[in-house]
Image: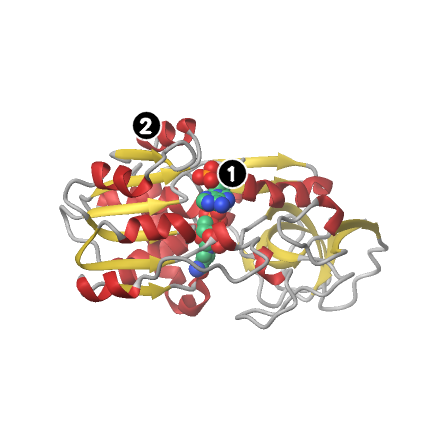
Amino acid sequence: NQQIVLKNRPEGKPSENDFEIQEIETGEIKAGEILLESKYISVDPYLRGRMRDEESYIEPFKLGKPIESMIVAEIVESKNPNFSIGEHVIGMLDWKKQQIHTGEDLRKLDKSLAPLSAYLGVLGLTGVTAFLALDKIGNLKSGETLLVSGAAGAVGSIAGQIGKIKNCRVVGIAGSDEKTEHIKEKFGFDAGINYKTTANITKAIENACPDGVDVYFDNVGGEILNAALQNINKAARIICCGAISIYNSTEVPTGPRPEGILIKKSAVMQGFLVRDHIQDFQRAIEGLAGWLKSGKITYDETIIEGFENTPKAFIQLFEGRNTGKMLVKI
Ligand code: NDP
């Protein structure tokens, strides 16, 4: 058996040296326990925050201890009457090939409804984030303009498609021409902006959003947020969902400030944390599953094979190497 632990707290961008793969003994399961074999591991940008030794909404990872994230696992041994061999579950689990568990807080998955990996993406936390952030803060109305950053990613690609379902003009910002083309072709975005090759993003947003921006779904923060704010309409809603552009910063970034424009436009800028809305997860998953079934939404996955490549897959999020949900298949 193997596990992956945090060896060092990363300085700036994480590197593979910040992680260590260790050989471990699995041990024997006791009455009431199950043995899980990891099948798909979710790597997510927010894990970067847990690698810092600072107080947040979730405890930091401990040095020398396994990283944890959402994992889909198969039950390979069971001494718990509620779980049978061959069933699949999802939960916050350690980066281990196999692990012993009590079954508490694990949810059983139905393989016949969707592929197992989908429960970590479109029907998992990233899909639910897109759905609930728009539901709770976005309040999209037909004919409005939705601007999405990180648009080719797991959250962004679903957020954009929900915008189309709501009859909005949807504009996406992403890091390559392949991605900006892809979000138009596959996900129905009306326009795309490549932030890496566009000299003046403020102007590019203005051109792509001739009626201004009513809702900005922010996955990246930083300069792109600033450019988006220059284009908001009266009573705009700005959803602060993620800020990946500053997750590796070693100092608190400074720069242009939003208050002037928020006042001028009577706009609302609100942080969103999906874990605050657990009571709405079921509704979100049912909504997303319905759209998936009827073909109103679709999704991408970037799947890296091999347990030992989990740190690499995580690091690649910061290089934009994924479209859609980044996953590791064991
Ligand atoms: P993604 O699938 O979007 O993957 C990350 C993407 O971010 C990359 O593919 C890359 O795409 C882009 N990126 C990386 N570095 C930068 C940068 N410096 N500037 C701009 N873009 C960058 O990840 P998720 O969909 O899982 O997450 C998206 C965001 O949502 C993250 O910020 C995450 O933390 C947040 N989130 C928040 C939740 C909440 O409850 N608030 C829940 C889930 C996610 P590109 O090629 O376009 O650069």
Which type of secondary structure does the marked residue at label 1 adopt? loop
In the picture, the disc for residue 160 is none
Ligand 1 closer than 8 Å to the CB at disc 1?
yes
Residue located at (67% from left, 44% from top): 310
**Residue 298 image point, x, y percent:** 37, 37
Query: Which amino acid is tagged 2?
Result: Glu
CA–CA distance in space, label 1 to label 2: 19 Å
Query: Which amino acid is tagged 1?
Result: Gly
Q: Residue 316 or 168: which is nearer the viewer?
A: 316
Q: Earlier in the sequence, mark 1 or mark 2?
A: 2
**Residue 2 image point, x, y percent:** 79, 49
The residue that label 1 is drawn on is 320
User: As drawn, is 231 to the left or to the right of 192?
Assistant: left
Quadrant, the C terminus: top right
Residue 124 visible in the shown view: no
Q: Residue 241 or 100: which is nearer the viewer?
A: 241
**What colouring method underlies this structural image?**
secondary structure
Residue located at (14% from left, 44% from top): 211
Which type of secondary structure does the marked residue at label 2 adopt? helix
**Residue 144 image point, x, y percent:** 16, 48
Residue located at (55% from left, 44% from top): 318
Pointer 2 local density, CA inside 10 Å: few below 14, some 14–19, many at least 20: few
User: As drawn, is 311 to the left or to the right of 110?
Assistant: right
The residue that label 2 is drawn on is 185
User: As drawn, is 309 to the left or to the right of 175?
Assistant: right
Rendered image quadrant of residue 28: bottom right
| Front of the two marks 1 and 2 | 1
Q: How many marks?
A: 2
Q: Residue furthest bottom?
A: 55
Q: Residue 236 or 33: which is nearer the viewer?
A: 236
In the depicted structure, whether residue 40 falls above or below residue 252: above
Q: Residue 101 or 248: which is nearer the viewer?
A: 248
